[in-house]
Image (tube, grey):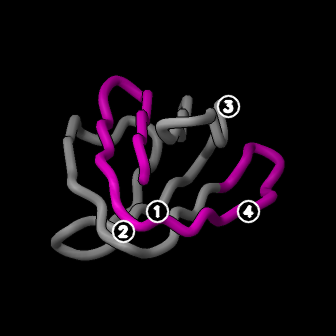
Amino acid sequence: MTLEIISASEILFKGEATLVTLPGEMGAFTVLKNHASIISVLVPGKILYRSPDGHEETIQVKGGIADVDNNVISVCIY
């Protein structure tokens, strides 16, 4: 999957991920390969993503929006 995390001022991450957990408005949710299309509002919390080599990173966010479609996860945060 391709993950893009952007803010108004910079690209925080753009690359491949095998797992992404997002702080959705109705609760945290995890996206894996071939996930159904979804658009979600994000609330304060952490985005966790795992690279293909197994390394995990987290980014603290105040909120934003996430779009998942055709193995591309686009996240705009503030």
Label 1 crowd bin: few (<14), some (14–19), many (20+), radius 10 Å:
some
Q: For residue 21, which numbered disc appears in the image?
A: 1
**Region in magenta:** 50-78
For the residues labelled 2 and 4, the Cα–Cα distance comes to 16 Å
Asked whether the beta carbons under mark 2 and mark 1 sit within 8 Å of each other, the answer is no
Q: What amino acid is found at the position of numbered circle 3 in the picture?
A: Gly
The x, y position of residue 17, in whole percent, is: 63, 42
11 up-or-down from 43: above or below: above
Asked whether the beta carbons under mark 1 and mark 4 sit within 8 Å of each other, the answer is no
Residue located beneath label 2 in the image: 23
Residue at horizontal 60 percent and vertical 46 percent from the top: 18
Q: What amino acid is found at the position of numbered circle 4 in the picture?
A: Glu
For the residues labelled 2 and 3, the Cα–Cα distance comes to 20 Å
Label 4 crowd bin: few (<14), some (14–19), many (20+), radius 10 Å:
some
First along the sequence among labels 1 and 4:
1
With 56 as the anchor, is 70 left or right in this view?
left
Residue located beneath label 3 in the image: 15
The answer to which quarter of the image holds residue 70 is top left
Q: What amino acid is found at the position of numbered circle 2 in the picture?
A: Pro
For the residues labelled 2 and 1, the Cα–Cα distance comes to 7 Å
Label 3 crowd bin: few (<14), some (14–19), many (20+), radius 10 Å:
few
Residue located beneath label 4 in the image: 56
First along the sequence among labels 3 and 1:
3
